[in-house]
Amino acid sequence: MLEVLTNAPLNTVQDLGRPGSISYGVACGGAMDCNAFTLGNILVGNSPDAAGLEIVFFPFKIRFQQDCVFAITGAPAKVRLDAVPLPSCWSMMARAGQTLVMEAPEKGMRSYLTVAGGLDVPRVLGGRATDIKGGFGGFEGRGLQKGDLLPCGKSTTCSMPTNGLGLAALPPLPHKNGLELHVLPAAEYEEFTQESQACLVQQQWRITTQANRVGFRLEGDTSLQTRRPLSLLSHGLLPGTVQVPPSGQPIIQMADANTCGGYPKIGIIAEPDLSLLSQMPPGGLVTFRMITHEQALTRFRAHRQHLRQLAEQIDAAKAYILTQ
C-alpha cells in the first residue's frame, strides 16, 4: 500500500493504455512517456503494462505502508528515500514506514514511479489508466489527493541488491531548443500546398502553453494551408496524428488524443518519438523530418529490440549481484 502525502491533481495512475477501446470513442490513454514507464516496470520485474504513477506535479511525497521494490524513471527528479538521495533510473527496496520525496526535475516534464507487482487498481475497458476526461480508470477516475491509499499487487520480486540497481547511463531526454520528430505523410498530406509540405519540415515549431495529455498545439512563423477548402466528416484519430485547423498552426494528438475529429491531417509521428515529445516543455522547439513507412517500421523494431536487451541485461546484473 502507498499513502499519498501531498495533493497532486495532475498526478495519475497510468499503464500502457487501452488502444482496443478507441473504436468505442474511448481514448487510448496511458503513460505519456511509454519508454520511461516501460523501463520502470522492467527495473522492478513487472510486465511492461503493470500500473504505476505518472508524476507531473511536484513536490510529490508518498509513504510506503509495506516493504516494496520501487523504481523512479523519466525526467530526472531529485529523489530522497527518507534522507537518502537516490539516482534516476534506479530501483530500490523501501521498507514499511519510509517516505519518498520527489522534487521538480531540472530537465523533462514527467517522472514515473513503478512498484513491484504494479498498482492493484481495477481494470476498466481492458486497462488501468486514468481517463480524467471520462472520470474513470486509475484510482477513482481522478488525480491523486492527500490521504489516498494505493494498493500494490502481489510481487514476484522477492529480493533486491542492498544498494539497489539501475542504469549506468540515463536514457536521453530532448533539449528544449530542438527535438526532431520523424513523421509519415497522413491521409490528407497531398491536399496541402507544396509550400506547406515544405514548410512543415523546413521551419521550427514552438510548443505553446496549450499542451496537455490530449494534445500539443504548435506555432510557427508560416501557417500550413490546403490547396482548396476542405470539409471533412469527423473521423477516427490516433495519438501522434498531426492535425491542421483553420489557423494553419498544427496540433499533435497525444496519449489522451481525441478519438475523432474533422481537421485535415498532414502527418503521423513515429511512435518512439512521442515519448520524447512528452518530455518537452511549453516553449520547446521541434522540427519534423519526413520518413517512409519502411523507415518507421525499422525504427519501431529497433526500439522494441533495445527494450528487450535492457530487460535481459538488468535481469542478468541482478542475478549476478545477488549471488555474490
Image (cartoon, rainbow, N blue to C red):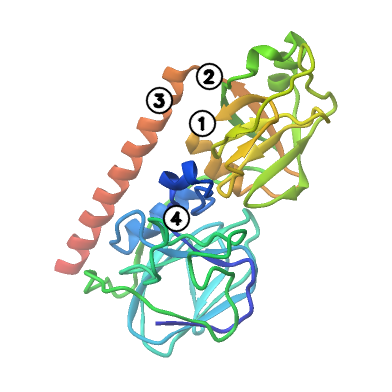
Q: Quadrant of the N terminus?
A: bottom left
Residue that mark 3 sits on? 297
Residue appearing at x 78%, y 31% in the figure: 249
Q: Earlier in the sequence, mark 3 or mark 2?
A: 2
For residue 112, say whether it is visible: yes
Picture disc at residue 270: 1
Q: Residue 149's spot in the image, x, y percent? A: 47, 83
Residue appearing at x 66%, y 28% in the figure: 233
CA separation, marks 1 and 3? Answer: 9 Å
Q: Residue 211's spot in the image, x, y percent? A: 71, 49
Residue that mark 4 sits on? 37
Name above or below for residue 196 compared with residue 159: above
At label 1, which amino acid type do we have? Ala
Residue most extreme to the top: 194
Marks 2 and 1 close (CB-CB < 8 Å): yes
Marks 1 and 3 close (CB-CB < 8 Å): no
> In the figure, is residue 231 to the left or right of 247?
left
Residue 204 sits in which quadrant?
top right
Q: Residue 86's spot in the image, x, y percent? A: 47, 71
> Are there few (<14), some (14-19), or many (20+) residues within 10 Å of tag 4?
many
CA separation, marks 1 and 4? Answer: 18 Å
Q: Quadrant of the C terminus?
A: bottom left
